[in-house]
Image (cartoon, rainbow, N blue to C red):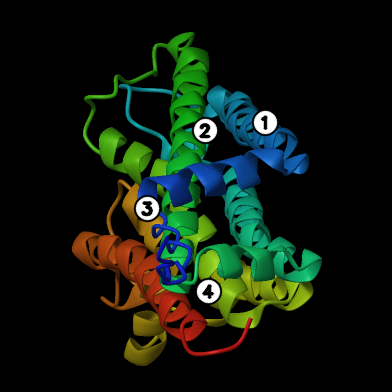
Amino acid sequence: MTTLTSVPPTTPAAAPPARFRDLLAAEWIKMRSLRFTPWAIALTVLFVVGSAAVATLTDKATVSGPAEFRPFDAYPATGYWTLMLVAGSMGALTVVSEYSSGLIRTTTMAVPARGSVVLAKAAVTAALWTAVGTAASTGSFLVSQAILNGHHAGVPITHPGVFRALAASASLAPVCALVGLGLGVLLRHAAATITTSVFALLMLPTMFSESNRWSADVKHALVSAAWNRLVQTWGPDPASLGYTATIPGSWSAYILWPLITVALAVLVVKRRDV
């Protein structure tokens, strides 16, 4: 005679939590899959380097005397304001494109840790745009100095002020991209995010001057004003009445803008529905 024994039902094992490096790989695949990404990056770098060449060719006729670093040739505002615009917009699109397509729901179902998803997006965005900014900044410097060398006015990278300007211009791209990404998580709408990003990064600084203390303090806390100060190699403008930005303060603005926007994004995404 056989005895039947009951076997307790087994529950399926829970899927192991996603490792952060897996999230990084997934976000890199998503970013690579956006068709406009390589074209936008390539055209932006070409435009930035080309603007440096045009600025230097326009200015070379006035070059005379001993060689000195000319940041308005190597890093013209036209090229780098464009870099800010593209980096901020594309940083925003890495997030809002998922909200508009509904892919964000699939992502959060697969990875309930929403804060980790945002941090993975931020890490991939920072790495990509650091590479883009470095390519644009280095290319701008090399092209401008190659042109100026024909007038014996080129300077090496070890010249005073050059490395700071190169590093500030290279860092400008990831700073703006992360600000755009953070705003994208907060606003979740493409038009609103890009408009806010453009306003904060490009338009807002023009509304303030250095004619009084409070206006100067606000202006110096903005990203584009910080970049202007970091690439500048000459003394303060007499019109500023002493309300000039400092080098440490400008680097602080570079750090705080992306840090605050991404931190707010991580905090908010944990507390609201997708």
**In the figure, residue 190 lies in which quadrant?**
bottom right
Identity of the residue furthest to the front in this view: 1
**Residue 253's x, y, as percent?**
33, 68
Residue 136 is tagged as: 2
- Amino acid type at circle 4 is Pro
- Amino acid type at circle 2 is Ala
Nearer mark to the viewer, of 1 and 4? 1
Q: What residue is at 53 percent from the left and 56 percent from the top? A: 177
Disc nearer the start of the sequence (3/4): 3
Disc nearer the start of the sequence (1/4): 1
- Tell which of 110 and 212 is nearer to you: 110
Regarding mark 1 in the picture, which secondary structure is present there? helix
Provide the residue designation for mark 4. 205
Regarding mark 2 in the picture, which secondary structure is present there? helix
Nearer mark to the viewer, of 3 and 4? 3
Provide the residue designation for mark 3. 20
Regarding mark 3 in the picture, which secondary structure is present there? helix
Q: What residue is at 38 percent from the left and 75 percent from the top? A: 263
Regarding mark 4 in the picture, which secondary structure is present there? helix
Residue 42 is tagged as: 1
Disc nearer the start of the sequence (2/4): 2
Q: Are marks 1 and 3 in contact (CB under 8 Å)?
A: no
Binning the other alpha carbons within 10 Å of mark 3 as few (below 14), some (14 to 19) or many (20 upward) gives few
Disc nearer the start of the sequence (1/3): 3
Q: Is residue 234 left or right of residue 31?
A: left
Q: Quadrant of the N terminus?
A: bottom left
Q: How far apart are the two marked residues, 2 and 4, measured between alpha carbons?
A: 23 Å
Q: Are marks 1 and 4 in contact (CB under 8 Å)?
A: no
Q: What residue is at 30 percent from the left and 49 percent from the top? A: 234
Disc nearer the start of the sequence (2/3): 3
Q: How far apart are the two marked residues, 1 and 3, measured between alpha carbons?
A: 29 Å
Binning the other alpha carbons within 10 Å of mark 2 as few (below 14), some (14 to 19) or many (20 upward) gives many
